[in-house]
Amino acid sequence: MMLMLLLVLLLVLLLVLILVLILVLLLMLVLLRLVTSLLQRRLVYKGFLAARQAMQRIRLLVSLSVDVNPDFGCYAGGKRQVLQSLERRFQPDLSRLELRTWCNEELIDIAHDAWSTWIYDRYQNCCLGISL
């Protein structure tokens, strides 16, 4: 009887240990996702900041492209409207701190919840072999 009770107790302890290990692994997964998310947000911000610093060069390339290919659908508004729209997309009036907030709230959070992002991610994975 005592042996049976001891075996049951050991079994319960083993189950508790397994549950604790599962909880620890889940916590580690959550922390890993959080750190990854923070790193991704930082990279998006740095990439956008670098693109904004190259805004005049990008504007020049688009200007030349509009001159060469004025019939492209993306240039339908005319050169002036296209270049003004391009400049607005770089958020030139925002400070670095405001730009970081804008990147997080307007670029990442909205894109993360968009169905079009989900569809495009699946397309890249299926057709281009880019993993999610």
Image (cartoon, rainbow, N blue to C red):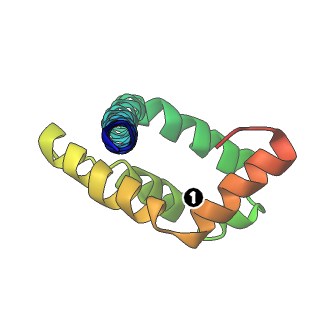
Outermost residue on the front side: it is 1
Q: Is residue 124 visible?
A: yes
Residue at left 41%, top 36%?
A: 55
Task: Identify the residue at image location x=53%, y=59%.
Answer: 82
Q: Amino acid at mark 1?
A: Lys
| Label 1 CA crowd tier, 10 Å (few <14, some 14–19, many 20+) | some
As rendered, which of 79 and 106 lies closer to the eye? 106
Q: Secondary structure at mark 1?
A: helix
Q: Is residue 32 above or below residue 92?
A: above
Residue at image x 41%, y 32%? Answer: 47
Residue 109 location (% of width, % of height):
36, 59
Q: Is residue 53 left or right of residue 112?
A: left
- For image coordinates 39% across by 53% down, the residue present is 108
Quarter the C terminus occupies: top right
Say left or right for 125 vs 114. Answer: right
Residue 118 image offset from top left, x and y in percent: 61, 62
The percent position of residue 61, horizontal first and vertical second, equals 59, 36
The quadrant of the rendering that contains the N terminus is top left
Instruction: Judge from the rendering whether residue 81 lies leftward or rightward of residue 70; answer left or right.
Output: left
Provide the residue designation for mark 1: 79
Quadrant in the rendering for residue 129: top right
Left or right: where does residue 15 sit relative to residue 98?
Answer: right
Give the quarter of the image for residue 72. bottom right
Res 69 visible = no
46 or 113, nearer to the observer: 113
Looking at the image, which is closer to me, 11 or 23? 11
Q: Position of residue 29 (x, y in %)?
A: 40, 38
